[in-house]
Image: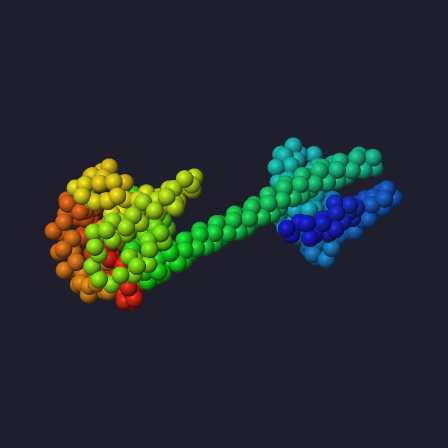
Amino acid sequence: MTLLLDRPNQQALLDLKRILIVDDEEPIRRLLGYMLQTNGYEAVLASNSHDARQKLEKQPFALMLCDVNMPGESGMDLARNILSKHPHTAVIMVTGLDSSLLANTAIDMGTFGYIIKPFECNEVLIDVANALRRRRLEMENRLHRENLQDIVQTKTLALQQALEWLELRTEELQLSREETIQRLAIAAEFRDSATSQHIQRMSHYCELLARKSGMPSERCDLIRTASPMHDIGKIGTPDHVLLKPGKFTPEEFTIISQHAEIGFRILDGSNAEILKVAAAIAWTHHERWNGSGYPRQLKGTAIPVEGRIAAIADTFDALTTQRVYKPAFSIDHSIDLMSQHRGEHFDPELLDIFIASLDDIKIIHDQYGTQSPRGTTQEP
Ligand SMILES: [Fe+2]
């Protein structure tokens, strides 16, 4: 990002023609300066390393022509320092000593050339032009790489933000779908005054039991979301049966028993997995492990596991909360009653898991309260 903001400065550095000449011999300094000035360069002269450093701190240079042997700090030490501190400045060494060892050392340090005195004017101009061309190519290459990195970073950031946005929307959609289902389920059950707490407790018992029995997490979430619709078929039960406070006649039992089938018919036929699970729960939550349930008298594992889970969760909540036809039983008493029907009404393995999870069950029981419903219907 910095590169894009600093692009004008980078371009100015690329186009720079200012050259620093460092030599303790004044005639050499002046000669080099004159040669460069007359060929379109801006020449700045320094008589020693200290002077050169000060000038480099004040303004940028494209190139430094640096004598090797100078009093005080040597040209090699100065060059080494400048190459690390001012990477945009190219360096050419100038010396009267024709030493391959020195030349190799200078090249290994990163200098761009090695001119031996006495030099020809053209020789210097060619070396300077070559050094500046190489400097420009290296800088452009580095800028291009930095530019690419910047683009990749920007795109990656944009992608991350898009993914976060998408995750947030998906989460919102999931929450709103879950809340819509819960509200519809409450609306459907409002006629027999089942409370929203019943819906929440029951769905969380279902999810807990599904998790404890080792079902995949996504399936457990689906069961929690779908289970509130287990009694949606009561929408088709006549008021005189649904709202009857006393005991049902056999005919009335038959009528209210139809809510499982009606619920299934309302929910069946969708391609949405949540509605498939909801339809299965509505249809089978009154089936019993020994085949004495309704509406199809399914037996054992012929009852979908979601239905077996819902049967335990629904019965436990009915027992532990007050209904118009019964008081709220204690959790221990409710578990005792359900245990008596282990392997008859309930899947024995699932019931064992449910009982083993009693600490977590109590947390859900307490968390969602046990507000008395005005008239939750009895179910056969
Ligand atoms: Fe039911």
Image spot of residue 357 (x, y percent) = 21, 53
| Location of residue 215 by image quarter | top left
| 120 or 342: nearer the viewer | 342
- In the image, taking residue 355 as reference, residue 106 lies left or right, namely right
Nearest the viewer among 219 and 17 is 219
Residue lying at 45% horizontally and 55% vertically, measured from the top left: 176
Residue 151 falls in which quadrant of the image? top right
Q: Position of residue 211 (x, y in %)?
A: 28, 48
25 left or right of 357 in image: right
**Residue 115: x and y, percent?**
74, 37
In this view of the protein, which residue sits in the foreground, 42 or 155? 155
Vertical comparison of 363 with 77: above or below:
below
On the question of residue 93 being in view, the answer is: no
Q: Residue at x 33, y 55 (%)?
A: 238
Q: Is residue 115 left or right of residue 372?
A: right
173 on left or right of 34 = left
Please tell me which residue is depicted at 65% across the width and 32% down the height of the picture.
100
Q: Position of residue 254 (x, y in %)?
A: 25, 49
Res. 363 image quadrant: bottom left
